[in-house]
């Protein structure tokens, strides 16, 4: 059979780095092929070259045996090549159906397109309201939009860059059913993921990249996670050390009776109550779009709340304080959206460091001390093993995982008393994820209160001392991690067994 896609000696360089160095691989019709590698190994660059969003310096690309000349995303889509980016390509101010219409071929009617979106999204277990504006959607819901947009075009080759990073286990299982069905119909799938268990479950074959080069191939279903991880990082992963938690007598973060009305398209919070003590990690689980974004906005100060006493930090009411005032009290925050909220894409890493670390003597008498700022950013780069061309590198020049490591490192370097982190290892490779997890554990054991919001149950069960579940704007009573299991948490996430909810008390025993 003729390969659906064949790459021959693809090479791509950027100033100071060779992203792809003579990469060759082929994918057959109906094959699900994984591309594995550490952050910065060149995976995303290679996918952009295939899709036409970047041009290779040398090498050839063949589709169904025919050479593809210099191309762009529009010509790739005409060939049947579709891509879901790790960082989404959506316009925030318009609706879902309008976003999808922008890439729809030929004439269309919004009403008819909206019906198709609704039907397709429900068929594949990824329901989405076509009339909601994108800025009202959670990250998980935005990912659904990207996937549905591709499926509407019945692709011949579908490229997925970290497609399950913010999906629940149930949604992942449904997505895999969809992908297997597409493959059975002849669609080839290029699958980038750091979740080795998913690769083993789904993929037929895998190509491993390291430092921009192909270092090996594997049959994931015949390989162990340890073998795949060793191929990716070149060594055995370090073992995580979880020491016992010693909670502070009084909570550092106390939330009582927190209610936030819904705006158009948002989820209202109903009488939320919980606490986080120093010395512990508390995890918040939930299906995307159940109020996580609204709770994060209330806790971070991005959206001050009406009831000042509803949020207490270090024994003081902070409900009406803005984000800057909360940061001055020892609060640090990592949002789920790296580009735009966690970092300013065109700014350098040292400039992005100043945004939240200016209190670390990086600004004096209203003037930025560039030497100190670059020193601070350089320290974060070194400590967190960020692959970047120094503090002067722009945020958008980093791979998603390396930018995540920098943002997490920047916030931890502030030595916070309370640390709120959303999706801490989204798009991060297995080695970096282990490092971030260990850093969060060490931070908590040093006395900080850590609240982790994640849609990955494995992550929460790995590092958290207690667990909360959010569903339809309500938060469950706390569960001790060693006294619960994934099934119980999964039931609470879908409101089955609703007796686990706090019933709106807002003042459960903590």
Image (cartoon, helix red, strand yellow):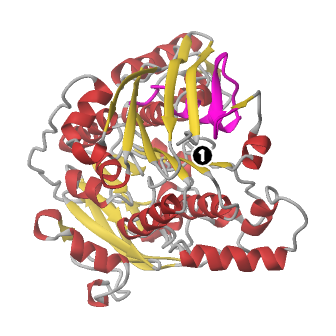
Q: As drawn, is 333 to the left or to the right of 132? A: left
* Residue 58 shown in magenta: yes
| Residue 354 seen | no
Q: Looking at the image, which residue is at 27% across and 22% down? A: 234
Residue position for label 1: 85
Q: Residues within 10 Å of mark 1 (few under 14, many from 20)?
A: some
Q: Is residue 399 above or below residue 393?
A: below
| Nearer the observer, 348 or 53 | 53
Quadrant where the image shows the C terminus? bottom left
Spot occupied by residue 346 in the image (x, y as percentages of width and height): 68, 29
Asked if residue 229 is positioned above or below residue 502 in the image, the reply reads: above
Lateral position of residue 300 relative to residue 116, left or right: left
Highlighted range, magenta: 37-66
- Front residue of 140/504: it is 140
Locate residue 295, reporting x and y percent: 48, 66
**Left or right of 90, for residue 232:** left
- Answer above or below: position of 434 versus 346: below
Q: Nearer the viewer, residue 6 or 82?
A: 6
| Residue at image coords 80%, 79% | 112
């Amino acid at each position: 059979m003729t390969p659906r896609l064949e790459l021959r000696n693809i090479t791509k360089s950027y100033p100071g780095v060779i992203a792809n160095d003579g990469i060759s691989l082929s994918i057959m019709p109906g094959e699900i092929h994984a591309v594995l590698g550490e952050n910065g190994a060149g995976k995303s660059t290679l996918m952009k070259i295939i899709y036409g969003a970047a041009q290779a310096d040398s090498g050839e690309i063949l589709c169904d045996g025919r050479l593809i000349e210099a191309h762009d995303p529009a010509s790739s889509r005409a060939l049947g090549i579709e891509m879901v980016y790790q960082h989404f390509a959506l316009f925030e101010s318009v609706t879902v159906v309008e976003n999808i219409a922008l890439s729809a071929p030929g004439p269309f009617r919004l009403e008819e397109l909206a019906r198709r979106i609704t039907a397709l999204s429900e068929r594949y277990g990824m329901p989405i309201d076509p009339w909601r504006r994108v800025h009202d959607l959670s990250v998980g819901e935005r990912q659904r939009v990207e996937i549905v947009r591709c499926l509407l075009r019945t692709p011949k080759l579908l490229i997925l860059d970290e497609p399950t990073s913010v999906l629940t286990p149930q949604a992942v299982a449904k997505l895999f059913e969809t992908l297997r069905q597409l493959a059975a119909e002849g669609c080839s799938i290029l699958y980038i993921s750091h979740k080795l268990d998913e690769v083993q479950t789904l993929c037929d074959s895998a190509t491993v990249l390291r430092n921009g080069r192909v270092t090996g191939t594997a049959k994931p279903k015949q390989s162990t996670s340890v073998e795949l991880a060793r191929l990716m990082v070149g060594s055995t992963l370090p073992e995580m050390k979880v020491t016992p938690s010693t909670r502070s007598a009084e909570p550092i973060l106390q939330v009582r009776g927190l209610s936030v009305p819904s705006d158009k398209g948002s989820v209202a919070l109903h009488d939320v109550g919980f606490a986080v003590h120093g010395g512990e990690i508390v995890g918040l689980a939930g299906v995307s779009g159940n109020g996580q974004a609204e709770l994060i906005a209330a806790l971070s100060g991005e959206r001050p709340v009406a009831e000042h006493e509803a949020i207490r930090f270090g024994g003081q009411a902070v409900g009406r304080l803005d984000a800057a005032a909360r940061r001055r009290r020892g609060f640090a925050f990592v949002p789920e959206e790296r580009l735009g909220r966690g970092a300013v894409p065109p700014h350098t890493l040292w400039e992005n460091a100043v945004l939240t670390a200016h209190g670390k003597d990086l600004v004096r008498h209203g003037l930025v001390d560039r030497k100190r700022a670059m020193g601070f950013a350089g320290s974060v780069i070194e400590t967190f093993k960020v692959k970047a061309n120094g503090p002067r590198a722009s945020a958008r020049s980093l791979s998603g995982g390396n930018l995540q490591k920098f943002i997490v490192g920047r916030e931890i370097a502030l030595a916070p008393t309370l640390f709120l982190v959303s999706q801490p290892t989204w798009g991060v490779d297995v080695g970096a994820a282990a490092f971030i997890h260990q850093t969060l554990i060490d931070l908590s054991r040093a006395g900080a209160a850590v609240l982790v919001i994640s849609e990955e149950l494995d992550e929460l069960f790995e590092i958290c001392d207690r667990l909360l579940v959010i569903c339809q704007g309500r938060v469950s009573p706390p569960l001790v991690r060693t006294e619960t299991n994934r099934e119980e948490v999964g039931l609470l996430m879908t409101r089955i067994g609703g007796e686990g909810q706090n019933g709106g008390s807002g003042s459960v025993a903590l």
